[in-house]
Image (cartoon, rainbow, N blue to C red):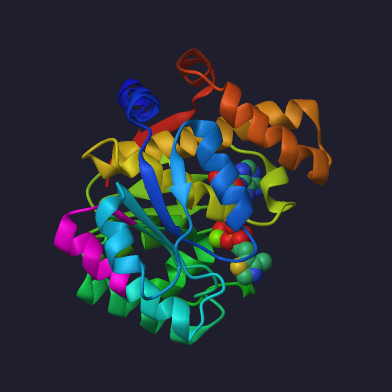
Amino acid sequence: MIEKAIEVLERLKKEVPLVHAITNYVAINNNANALLSIGASSAMVMSPEETYDFTAISDTLYVNIGTINNETKEAIIKSVISAKDHKKPVVIDPVGCAAIKSRVDFVNMLLKIGEISIIKGNVAEIKSLVGESANVKGVDSLDDSGNIDSCVKLARLTNTTVVATGKEDYISDGRRVVKVNNGTNLFTKITGAGCTLGAIMAATSACGDDKVISSLAALLVMNIAGELTEKESNLPGTFSTKFIDNLYILNSDMIRKYADIEVLGV
Ligand SMILES: Nc1ncnc2c1ncn2[C@@H]1O[C@H](COP(=O)(O)OP(=O)(O)O)[C@@H](O)[C@H]1O
Ligand SMILES: Cc1ncsc1CCOP(=O)(O)O
Ligand SMILES: [Mg+2]
Protein backbone atom coordinates (compact mmCIF):
# COMPACT_ATOMS: atom_id res chain seq x y z
CA MET A 1 0.00 0.00 0.00
CA ILE A 2 2.89 2.35 0.76
CA GLU A 3 4.37 1.63 -2.70
CA LYS A 4 1.04 2.47 -4.33
CA ALA A 5 0.91 5.74 -2.40
CA ILE A 6 4.44 6.53 -3.58
CA GLU A 7 3.34 5.88 -7.19
CA VAL A 8 0.62 8.53 -6.71
CA LEU A 9 3.22 11.02 -5.47
CA GLU A 10 5.62 10.28 -8.33
CA ARG A 11 2.77 10.74 -10.82
CA LEU A 12 1.92 14.05 -9.14
CA LYS A 13 5.45 15.37 -9.65
CA LYS A 14 5.27 14.45 -13.35
CA GLU A 15 1.75 15.74 -14.04
CA VAL A 16 1.69 18.85 -11.80
CA PRO A 17 -2.10 18.83 -11.25
CA LEU A 18 -3.93 22.15 -11.04
CA VAL A 19 -5.92 22.36 -7.82
CA HIS A 20 -8.91 24.69 -7.83
CA ALA A 21 -9.01 25.68 -4.17
CA ILE A 22 -11.92 27.42 -2.52
CA THR A 23 -10.44 27.69 0.93
CA ASN A 24 -10.55 29.94 3.99
CA TYR A 25 -8.90 33.35 4.45
CA VAL A 26 -6.81 32.05 7.35
CA ALA A 27 -5.04 29.23 5.52
CA ILE A 28 -5.16 30.38 1.90
CA ASN A 29 -1.50 31.38 1.53
CA ASN A 30 -0.21 28.32 3.44
CA ASN A 31 -2.32 26.07 1.21
CA ALA A 32 -0.90 27.60 -1.98
CA ASN A 33 2.71 27.33 -0.75
CA ALA A 34 2.27 23.74 0.42
CA LEU A 35 0.86 22.76 -2.98
CA LEU A 36 3.81 24.32 -4.79
CA SER A 37 6.26 22.54 -2.47
CA ILE A 38 4.80 19.09 -3.16
CA GLY A 39 4.94 19.74 -6.91
CA ALA A 40 1.32 20.73 -7.62
CA SER A 41 -0.11 23.96 -8.90
CA SER A 42 -3.03 25.88 -7.38
CA ALA A 43 -5.36 28.78 -7.99
CA MET A 44 -7.71 30.18 -5.37
CA VAL A 45 -10.66 31.25 -7.51
CA MET A 46 -13.65 32.11 -5.34
CA SER A 47 -15.98 34.40 -7.24
CA PRO A 48 -19.39 32.85 -8.12
CA GLU A 49 -19.15 34.21 -11.68
CA GLU A 50 -15.91 32.29 -12.25
CA THR A 51 -16.01 29.03 -10.34
CA TYR A 52 -18.07 26.81 -12.69
CA ASP A 53 -15.71 27.44 -15.60
CA PHE A 54 -12.57 27.34 -13.50
CA THR A 55 -13.35 23.92 -12.03
CA ALA A 56 -13.92 22.68 -15.58
CA ILE A 57 -10.33 23.54 -16.57
CA SER A 58 -8.75 22.33 -13.30
CA ASP A 59 -7.68 18.78 -12.44
CA THR A 60 -9.29 18.67 -9.01
CA LEU A 61 -11.41 20.74 -6.60
CA TYR A 62 -10.73 21.53 -2.94
CA VAL A 63 -13.68 22.90 -0.96
CA ASN A 64 -12.89 24.21 2.52
CA ILE A 65 -15.76 25.91 4.38
CA GLY A 66 -13.67 27.55 7.13
CA THR A 67 -14.75 31.15 6.43
CA ILE A 68 -17.79 30.73 4.17
CA ASN A 69 -20.30 33.48 3.51
CA ASN A 70 -23.24 33.72 1.11
CA GLU A 71 -21.01 34.56 -1.82
CA THR A 72 -18.51 31.74 -1.27
CA LYS A 73 -21.38 29.30 -0.68
CA GLU A 74 -22.71 30.16 -4.14
CA ALA A 75 -19.20 29.81 -5.58
CA ILE A 76 -18.82 26.38 -3.96
CA ILE A 77 -22.19 25.12 -5.23
CA LYS A 78 -21.28 26.11 -8.80
CA SER A 79 -17.89 24.41 -8.53
CA VAL A 80 -19.34 21.22 -7.09
CA ILE A 81 -21.85 21.03 -9.95
CA SER A 82 -19.08 21.70 -12.47
CA ALA A 83 -16.90 18.97 -10.93
CA LYS A 84 -19.78 16.51 -11.37
CA ASP A 85 -20.38 17.64 -14.97
CA HIS A 86 -16.68 17.42 -15.86
CA LYS A 87 -15.78 14.36 -13.73
CA LYS A 88 -13.22 16.04 -11.47
CA PRO A 89 -12.45 14.72 -7.98
CA VAL A 90 -13.73 16.81 -5.05
CA VAL A 91 -12.32 16.96 -1.53
CA ILE A 92 -14.48 18.61 1.13
CA ASP A 93 -12.99 19.90 4.37
CA PRO A 94 -16.00 20.61 6.63
CA VAL A 95 -14.12 23.07 8.88
CA GLY A 96 -16.15 24.22 11.88
CA CYS A 97 -19.17 21.98 11.26
CA ALA A 98 -18.91 20.49 14.76
CA ALA A 99 -19.51 23.95 16.26
CA ILE A 100 -21.83 25.50 13.65
CA LYS A 101 -24.85 23.32 12.87
CA SER A 102 -25.76 25.11 9.62
CA ARG A 103 -22.43 23.93 8.17
CA VAL A 104 -23.55 20.29 8.57
CA ASP A 105 -26.64 21.15 6.52
CA PHE A 106 -24.50 22.88 3.88
CA VAL A 107 -22.16 19.87 3.58
CA ASN A 108 -25.13 17.49 3.34
CA MET A 109 -26.55 19.65 0.55
CA LEU A 110 -23.23 19.45 -1.34
CA LEU A 111 -23.26 15.68 -0.93
CA LYS A 112 -26.73 15.59 -2.53
CA ILE A 113 -26.00 17.83 -5.52
CA GLY A 114 -22.43 16.69 -6.23
CA GLU A 115 -20.24 13.64 -6.55
CA ILE A 116 -17.87 14.06 -3.64
CA SER A 117 -14.75 11.88 -3.61
CA ILE A 118 -13.31 12.54 -0.14
CA ILE A 119 -14.51 14.11 3.11
CA LYS A 120 -11.59 15.07 5.34
CA GLY A 121 -12.12 16.50 8.80
CA ASN A 122 -10.87 16.37 12.34
CA VAL A 123 -12.54 13.81 14.61
CA ALA A 124 -15.13 16.27 15.97
CA GLU A 125 -16.15 17.31 12.45
CA ILE A 126 -16.49 13.71 11.24
CA LYS A 127 -18.53 12.80 14.35
CA SER A 128 -20.88 15.73 13.85
CA LEU A 129 -21.50 14.70 10.22
CA VAL A 130 -22.74 11.30 11.41
CA GLY A 131 -24.94 12.96 14.04
CA GLU A 132 -22.79 12.05 17.04
CA SER A 133 -22.00 14.50 19.81
CA ALA A 134 -18.46 15.85 19.64
CA ASN A 135 -16.13 17.56 22.03
CA VAL A 136 -15.15 20.70 20.18
CA LYS A 137 -13.80 24.23 20.55
CA GLY A 138 -14.56 26.26 17.43
CA VAL A 139 -12.58 24.76 14.55
CA ASP A 140 -10.51 22.53 16.87
CA SER A 141 -11.39 19.01 17.97
CA LEU A 142 -10.98 18.13 21.64
CA ASP A 143 -11.98 14.55 20.87
CA ASP A 144 -9.60 11.73 20.26
CA SER A 145 -11.75 8.66 20.52
CA GLY A 146 -14.33 6.93 18.37
CA ASN A 147 -12.39 8.02 15.28
CA ILE A 148 -12.52 4.70 13.52
CA ASP A 149 -16.24 4.08 14.04
CA SER A 150 -17.40 7.50 12.88
CA CYS A 151 -14.99 7.41 9.94
CA VAL A 152 -16.33 4.08 8.64
CA LYS A 153 -19.93 5.09 9.37
CA LEU A 154 -19.66 8.35 7.41
CA ALA A 155 -17.97 6.59 4.48
CA ARG A 156 -20.85 4.11 4.29
CA LEU A 157 -23.54 6.78 4.70
CA THR A 158 -22.12 9.03 1.99
CA ASN A 159 -20.45 6.52 -0.33
CA THR A 160 -17.21 8.53 -0.17
CA THR A 161 -13.72 8.02 1.20
CA VAL A 162 -13.50 9.60 4.66
CA VAL A 163 -10.39 10.76 6.49
CA ALA A 164 -10.67 11.49 10.22
CA THR A 165 -7.59 13.27 11.57
CA GLY A 166 -6.09 13.60 15.05
CA LYS A 167 -3.12 12.07 16.84
CA GLU A 168 -3.76 9.04 14.67
CA ASP A 169 -5.53 9.35 11.36
CA TYR A 170 -8.04 6.94 9.85
CA ILE A 171 -8.96 6.50 6.20
CA SER A 172 -11.98 4.45 5.14
CA ASP A 173 -14.09 3.85 2.07
CA GLY A 174 -16.58 1.92 4.23
CA ARG A 175 -14.83 -1.37 3.56
CA ARG A 176 -11.10 -0.86 3.99
CA VAL A 177 -9.61 1.01 6.95
CA VAL A 178 -6.06 2.36 7.13
CA LYS A 179 -4.57 3.91 10.25
CA VAL A 180 -1.69 6.37 9.91
CA ASN A 181 0.47 6.82 13.00
CA ASN A 182 2.82 9.47 11.59
CA GLY A 183 2.47 13.12 12.60
CA THR A 184 3.54 15.69 15.14
CA ASN A 185 1.78 17.51 17.95
CA LEU A 186 3.22 20.74 16.52
CA PHE A 187 0.46 20.64 13.90
CA THR A 188 -1.91 21.61 16.73
CA LYS A 189 0.23 24.69 17.48
CA ILE A 190 -0.09 26.26 14.03
CA THR A 191 -3.30 27.28 12.29
CA GLY A 192 -4.44 25.60 9.12
CA ALA A 193 -2.61 22.25 9.38
CA GLY A 194 -5.79 20.35 8.57
CA CYS A 195 -6.56 22.77 5.73
CA THR A 196 -3.11 22.18 4.25
CA LEU A 197 -3.64 18.43 4.45
CA GLY A 198 -6.98 18.84 2.64
CA ALA A 199 -5.37 20.86 -0.14
CA ILE A 200 -2.65 18.21 -0.55
CA MET A 201 -5.36 15.53 -0.58
CA ALA A 202 -7.09 17.33 -3.43
CA ALA A 203 -3.83 17.30 -5.40
CA THR A 204 -3.17 13.58 -4.81
CA SER A 205 -6.79 12.73 -5.64
CA ALA A 206 -6.10 13.87 -9.22
CA CYS A 207 -3.27 11.33 -9.50
CA GLY A 208 -4.92 8.04 -8.53
CA ASP A 209 -8.34 6.45 -8.98
CA ASP A 210 -8.24 4.70 -5.61
CA LYS A 211 -9.11 7.45 -3.13
CA VAL A 212 -7.96 5.42 -0.11
CA ILE A 213 -4.50 5.26 -1.65
CA SER A 214 -4.46 8.91 -2.75
CA SER A 215 -5.57 9.97 0.76
CA LEU A 216 -2.83 7.83 2.25
CA ALA A 217 -0.29 9.50 -0.06
CA ALA A 218 -1.38 12.94 1.19
CA LEU A 219 -1.24 11.89 4.85
CA LEU A 220 2.24 10.41 4.45
CA VAL A 221 3.59 13.56 2.78
CA MET A 222 2.04 15.85 5.38
CA ASN A 223 2.87 13.87 8.49
CA ILE A 224 6.37 12.68 7.58
CA ALA A 225 7.35 16.21 6.52
CA GLY A 226 5.96 17.32 9.91
CA GLU A 227 8.07 14.75 11.76
CA LEU A 228 11.22 15.81 9.91
CA THR A 229 10.46 19.44 10.70
CA GLU A 230 9.94 18.75 14.39
CA LYS A 231 13.54 17.50 14.55
CA GLU A 232 14.67 20.94 13.35
CA SER A 233 12.37 23.20 15.39
CA ASN A 234 9.72 22.86 18.06
CA LEU A 235 8.71 26.52 17.91
CA PRO A 236 5.55 27.25 15.90
CA GLY A 237 6.86 30.12 13.77
CA THR A 238 10.00 28.43 12.50
CA PHE A 239 8.16 25.09 12.32
CA SER A 240 5.72 26.62 9.80
CA THR A 241 8.48 27.88 7.53
CA LYS A 242 10.67 24.80 7.75
CA PHE A 243 7.63 22.58 7.17
CA ILE A 244 7.19 24.11 3.70
CA ASP A 245 10.90 23.37 3.03
CA ASN A 246 10.52 19.75 4.14
CA LEU A 247 7.46 19.26 1.92
CA TYR A 248 9.76 20.30 -0.92
CA ILE A 249 12.68 18.08 0.16
CA LEU A 250 10.68 14.91 0.91
CA ASN A 251 11.29 12.03 -1.53
CA SER A 252 10.09 8.46 -2.06
CA ASP A 253 12.93 6.86 -0.07
CA MET A 254 12.20 9.05 2.95
CA ILE A 255 8.54 8.00 2.78
CA ARG A 256 9.56 4.31 2.59
CA LYS A 257 11.83 4.79 5.61
CA TYR A 258 9.41 6.63 7.90
CA ALA A 259 5.87 5.52 6.93
CA ASP A 260 4.07 4.03 9.93
CA ILE A 261 0.68 2.66 8.91
CA GLU A 262 -1.64 -0.20 9.83
CA VAL A 263 -4.09 -1.77 7.40
CA LEU A 264 -7.11 -2.78 9.48
CA GLY A 265 -10.12 -4.91 8.57
CA VAL A 266 -13.64 -3.61 9.12
N1 LIG B 1 -1.47 15.15 18.46
C1 LIG B 1 -1.06 14.95 17.21
N2 LIG B 1 0.05 14.22 16.97
C2 LIG B 1 0.48 14.00 15.73
N3 LIG B 1 -0.12 14.49 14.61
C3 LIG B 1 -1.23 15.23 14.77
C4 LIG B 1 -1.76 15.50 16.07
N4 LIG B 1 -2.88 16.24 15.93
C5 LIG B 1 -3.03 16.45 14.61
N5 LIG B 1 -2.05 15.84 13.90
C6 LIG B 1 -1.88 15.87 12.43
O1 LIG B 1 -2.13 17.20 12.04
C7 LIG B 1 -2.86 17.27 10.81
C8 LIG B 1 -4.14 18.06 11.03
O2 LIG B 1 -4.99 17.31 11.84
P1 LIG B 1 -6.03 17.97 12.87
O3 LIG B 1 -5.31 18.81 13.87
O4 LIG B 1 -6.86 16.84 13.39
O5 LIG B 1 -6.91 18.82 11.88
P2 LIG B 1 -7.50 20.29 12.01
O6 LIG B 1 -6.31 21.19 11.86
O7 LIG B 1 -8.42 20.36 10.86
O8 LIG B 1 -8.19 20.37 13.33
C9 LIG B 1 -3.07 15.81 10.38
O9 LIG B 1 -2.09 15.49 9.44
C10 LIG B 1 -2.88 15.02 11.68
O10 LIG B 1 -2.35 13.73 11.43
C1 LIG C 1 -8.84 29.53 12.68
C2 LIG C 1 -9.82 29.37 11.59
N1 LIG C 1 -11.01 30.03 11.61
C3 LIG C 1 -11.76 29.78 10.56
S1 LIG C 1 -11.02 28.74 9.46
C4 LIG C 1 -9.66 28.58 10.45
C5 LIG C 1 -8.51 27.73 10.11
C6 LIG C 1 -8.76 26.33 10.57
O1 LIG C 1 -7.71 25.50 10.17
P1 LIG C 1 -7.62 23.97 10.56
O2 LIG C 1 -8.95 23.33 10.31
O3 LIG C 1 -6.61 23.44 9.62
O4 LIG C 1 -7.21 23.89 11.99
MG1 LIG D 1 -9.65 21.47 9.87
Along the horizontal axis of the image, is 127 left or right of 245?
Answer: left
Please name whichever residue, 173 or 4, is drawn nearer the observer in this view of the structure.
4
Q: Is residue 89 magenta?
A: yes
Q: How many marks?
A: 0
- Which quadrant of the figure has residue 183? top right
- The residue at the point 73 percent across, 42 percent down is 240
Q: Is any atom of residue 139 visible in this view? A: no
The spot of residue 141 in percent (x, y) is 60, 64
Please name whichever residue, 222 or 182, is drawn nearer the observer in this view of the structure.
222
Ligand 3 shows up in the quarter that is bottom right
Look at the picture and state if 196 lies above or below 214: below
The spot of residue 63 in percent (x, y) is 41, 63
Please name whichever residue, 256 or 60, is drawn nearer the observer in this view of the structure.
60
- The residue at the point 40 percent across, 34 percent down is 217
Look at the picture and state if 78 lies above or below 188: below
Look at the picture and state if 80 lies above or below 209: below
Residue lying farthest right? 235
Query: Where the N terminus falls, by quadrant?
Result: top left
- The residue at the point 58 percent across, 31 percent down is 247
- Which quadrant of the figure has residue 99? bottom right
Magenta segment: 78-90
The spot of residue 65 in percent (x, y) is 48, 70
The spot of residue 80 in percent (x, y) is 28, 67
- Which quadrant of the figure has residue 241? top right
Along the horizontal axis of the image, is 28 left or right of 22?
Answer: right
Q: Does the magenta stretch include residue 236?
A: no
